[in-house]
């Protein structure tokens, strides 16, 4: 019998349904757009809602938006025991341009550095019955930071609410502190936690990124594909332009 172990993988179409339920009652990660919209919601659709399944498609599309450039915007932690594998943790992250609420929060702290633009971890959740919950969350954070480091990201931030509460989607601030994050702004209630990365992947060039995105069984003549009209590599490393003042990004909950 194989020993129990923990592994990590970036989210994809197959693993998306396995994202575990967050600690906040009534929430569902597969339909949550709280970070993607200032008027977004964490609440799951009503069980009788006819568009419940349709609401999952935009979320999956957002999480996979950067896959061809550098990688998906989410990571799952899995506990394996023999042939059985169960998702026990989830982290969502990405460039600030992917999360308007995170950008609006960050704009409240002008003392934060504008360059290099950080990526942000918006969500960190580990199921309560996983055992060693804090240690598993630290391991998941470390795996995320290692992945971002390989992508050439030089800094990562998060905006948790309070030091030890799992209910907010970003998870407890204490977990980030244990994973090498330091407070860069804010207070105990609304801290901005930041970790500098070594950026071991900063030498990656477009050729490397295209090779990573290469589809299987394609002929040489069909590759590389035409240059996309969407985000460029530079968009992942710059701050979006400042927007007009918006409603309180922390919301009412």
Image (cartoon, rainbow, N blue to C red):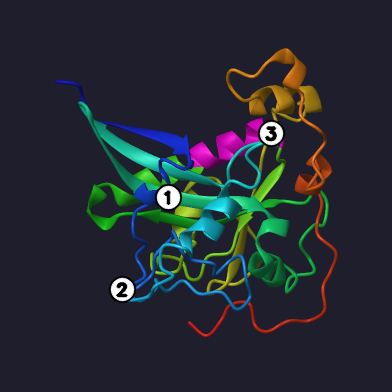
Work out how far the residue at label 2 is from the one at label 1, CA to CA, in angstroms.
23 Å
* Residue closest to the eye, 78 or 207: 207
Secondary structure state at the residue bearing disc 2: loop
Residue 111 in percent (x, y) is at 79, 66
**Residue 138, quarter of the rendered image:** top left
Q: Which residues are magenta?
A: 142-152
**Residue 185, quarter of the rendered image:** bottom right
Residue 88 in percent (x, y) is at 32, 47
Secondary structure state at the residue bearing disc 1: strand
Of label 1 and label 3, which has the lower sequence position?
Answer: 1
Relative to 131, residue 102 above or below: below
Q: Is residue 85 magenta?
A: no
Residue 106 in percent (x, y) is at 71, 67
Residue sitting at 69 percent across and 22 percent down?
211
Residue 90: image tag: 1
Work out how far the residue at label 1 is from the one at label 3, CA to CA, in angstroms.
23 Å
Task: Name the residue tied to disc 3.
Answer: 198
Task: Name the residue tied to disc 2.
Answer: 47
């Amino acid at each position: 019998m194989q020993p129990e172990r923990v592994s990590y993988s970036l989210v994809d179409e197959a693993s998306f349904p396995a994202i575990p339920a967050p600690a906040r009652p009534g929430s569902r990660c597969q339909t949550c757009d709280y970070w993607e919209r200032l008027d977004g919601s964490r609440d799951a659709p009503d069980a009788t809602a006819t568009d419940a399944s349709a609401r999952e498609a935009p979320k999956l599309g957002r999480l996979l938006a950067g896959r061809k450039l550098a990688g998906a915007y989410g990571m799952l932690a899995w506990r394996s025991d023999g042939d059985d594998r169960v998702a026990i943790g989830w982290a969502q992250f990405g460039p600030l341009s992917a999360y308007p609420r995170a950008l609006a929060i960050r704009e409240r702290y002008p003392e934060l550095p504008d360059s290099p633009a950080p990526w942000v971890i918006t969500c960190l959740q580990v199921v309560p019955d996983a055992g060693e919950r804090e240690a598993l969350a630290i391991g998941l954070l470390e795996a995320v930071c290692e992945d971002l480091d390989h992508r050439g990201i030089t800094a990562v931030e998060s905006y948790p609410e309070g030091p030890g509460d799992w209910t907010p989607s970003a998870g407890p601030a204490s977990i980030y502190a244990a994973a090498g994050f330091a407070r860069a702004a804010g207070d105990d209630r609304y801290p901005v936690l930041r970790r500098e990365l070594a950026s071991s992947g900063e030498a990656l060039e477009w050729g490397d990124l295209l090779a990573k995105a290469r589809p299987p069984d394609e002929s040489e003549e069909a590759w590389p594909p035409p240059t996309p009209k969407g985000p460029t590599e530079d968009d992942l490393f710059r701050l979006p332009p400042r927007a007009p003042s918006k409603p309180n990004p922390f919301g009412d909950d």
